[in-house]
Image (cartoon, coloured by chain):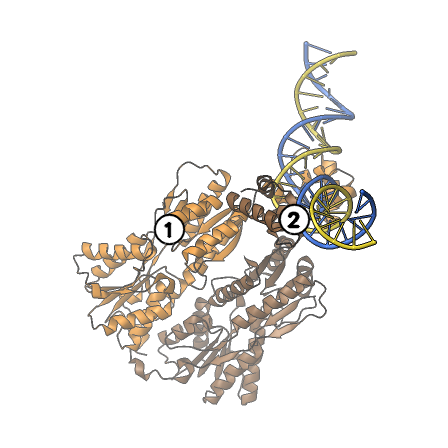
Chain colours: A brown, B orange, C blue, D yellow
Amino acid sequence: MSTMHEVARRAGVSLKTVSRVVNGEAAVSEATRQKVTAAIAELDFRPNSVARKLRTGRIDLIGLALPQLSQPYFSALAEAVMREAERHGLTVLIELTGGDPEAELATAREHGPHLGGLLMYPVGLSDEQARSVARFVPTVLMSERAYDAPVDRVAMANREGARALVAHMASLGYTRIAALGADHSGRPEHTAAHLRLAGYQDGLREAGLDCPPELVQEVSTADWNRHAGAAGMRRLIDTGASFDAVVAFSDVLALGALRTLQEAGLRVPADVAVAGFDNIDDARYSYPTLTSVEPGIAQIAREALALLNNRMNDAAAAENRLIVADFELTARESTLGGMAAWGGA
Amino acid sequence: MSTMHEVARRAGVSLKTVSRVVNGEAAVSEATRQKVTAAIAELDFRPNSVARKLRTGRIDLIGLALPQLSQPYFSALAEAVMREAERHGLTVLIELTGGDPEAELATAREHGPHLGGLLMYPVGLSDEQARSVARFVPTVLMSERAYDAPVDRVAMANREGARALVAHMASLGYTRIAALGADHSGRPEHTAAHLRLAGYQDGLREAGLDCPPELVQEVSTADWNRHAGAAGMRRLIDTGASFDAVVAFSDVLALGALRTLQEAGLRVPADVAVAGFDNIDDARYSYPTLTSVEPGIAQIAREALALLNNRMNDAAAAENRLIVADFELTARESTLGGMAAWGGA
DNA sequence: CCATCGATTGACATCGTTGAACTAGCCATG
DNA sequence: CATGGCTAGTTCAACGATGTCAATCGATGG
């Protein structure tokens, strides 16, 4: 790579003048500007961003810390964030934390100082850890949970969404509604799992329905995948409890559950209605198609980047803000029926 | 953030001595080392990687350019690469190209100079563009296609894998085997789509079976998703052609196809056998479970990083290498049957 | 004709770190 | 005792850009 120095020599001007041209500063005559531009083109010069960063202290790289990528929800979120970041002229560095609070903290500690900002989907992070994270780098958390730390937050309406699912099922006449994906594993409260469980209970209460503990199946958040969904459903069936609907706390859990129900000879939704969360692409192509809550990923990405951008430019921004994205319940065959047309495969 | 300078002053030693301690160089007495270590701890100093990069020219950041993340195959690949990179002490920056050759080239041009190396899954890249990419940064392509450029390559056995799938189906007695996912859209040859089509044809030939053109459905590689799989299957059915098996060129295509077949009242595999490629997690939880080719993602990630690391450390490495990962055919219900136990939902 | 002004341009220090070259002290050797 | 070789440490320049401030120049006005 050629440097500004070489460009300057070739154009017969000083280093600083080249810098001026490159940065589009005003005080350069048209003649010199052209000389310099020509030299830049001839040498195929492009400014060394590392040197520039060192000098200016500005960094156009932001981190995105996610528990994992292989869950469709997270890869969709990552894509949305990357697209949005591009609009802000930012590059995104994805970090995987596995949902481990130590890893979440370590990400910020290790990479924070070299990032302009950090977007994190925290799972295990404690208040104190969150404070620590925010010390290293301007941070926006994608979490409904309030933290005692100077961070902004963007969240989906976990509680409201779960409540809406239960209300939807209740309105269709289902009365023994099970939950799949509760997680009491010593984690901070206000995680997605906690909030969705709370919303589920809200919904039952409002519908005047029972909430028998045996209908709540635990699945550790870190294991929200098809395997665990299928296994959790199997456990629920094996308890012998009677139920006619299942609210899974994520679509992949629901898709796993569908599989187990079908293996068990139970028809969806004739015998058991099923709904999930996240509205991933698969929900439209499963068998049957899956009722789900769309968490507004695009909006989350947009708001998160707006907040982060603010904080990056104005470190001492006044208040910490919380933005809750709009959600939407999309009802499909797994609760509504309409399977007749499919033939009895 | 505190700097080495402050650490040096606090420890009462020179800048360089601090640098030595930080980098674990030998010529430091135990006494001074401890003084410096203490000062580092007190000030919570961590070296500024931007300055270090500028000085050493070494960069521990590598790029991973993928068409997209939301396909399970790519997110799984990304996770594998990130895990492997960590073992090498490297950080991964993911870039999305959308499979557009211009974007693939732009990624290298924009980010290449600031990356230690680049791992790319090329889709549209031409020879000349590949040469250009490699000029910007040490590059390893994840592609079976040979490029006239100084790049190493890691590939899966696309052609062999497809051939094995057809052989598998032929051995089970299927004779009219369709293909879903061919892509003749003016792209360079040797893409996954081309190779899998070639393997499919190899398999048919070896089994002594016909290869009627109406059984080959096109789906542009950029659209390999459930939607397109379902639509492609629909088109195939609508042609009225008779077939008893479908080899889809990716699992998501196959999963979409399953949906359409079920809608059409066709039983899998009793009426039509289905198989896919990639062996994504979903293949084990679909209905029915999906026969697929496991492309050896872990091995690909491992080999790719080994090659890249070599090239980063020894820019003028001798020959360009090609490593083809081992594949494995995993037969499941979509070709083998065993659905009886499921009940007739 | 000289002082002043606005518009360009350049010299130099600087960001935080590391590599090269050098020095001070100490011990062993002949 | 002079020499040389080692160790532990220092000083200085450099990586490639940008910010600060001063210098230059032609033109203008008195």
Q: Secondary structure at mark 2?
A: helix
The image quarter containing residue B222 is bottom left
**Residue A54 shows which numbered tag?**
2
Residue B159 lies, in percent from the top left, at 29, 53
Q: Secondary structure at mark 1?
A: loop
Q: Is residue B121 above or below residue B4?
A: below
Which residue is drawn at the image coordinates 64% and 63% (left, top)? A139
Callout 2 amino acid: Leu
Q: Is residue A282 above or below residue B147?
A: below
Q: Nearer the viewer, residue B289 or B165?
A: B165
Q: Is residue B323 above or below residue A147?
A: above
Callout 1 amino acid: Ser
Q: Chain of mark 1?
A: B
Q: Residue A11: in sight, yes or no?
A: yes
Residue A295 lies, in percent from the top left, at 52, 74
Q: Nearer the viewer, residue B29 or A137?
A: A137
Residue B250 lies, in percent from the top left, at 34, 62
Residue A58 located left or right of residue A256? right
Residue C11 located left or right of residue A291? right
Q: Residues within 10 Å of mark 1 (few under 14, many from 20)?
A: some
Residue underneath mark 1: B126
Q: How many labels sit on residues?
A: 2
Q: Is residue A217 above or below residue B195?
A: below
**Residue B204 shows which numbered tag?**
none
Q: Residues within 10 Å of mark 2 (few under 14, many from 20)?
A: some
Residue B220 lies, in percent from the top left, at 34, 63
Which residue is drawn at the image coordinates 32% and 79% (left, top)? B345
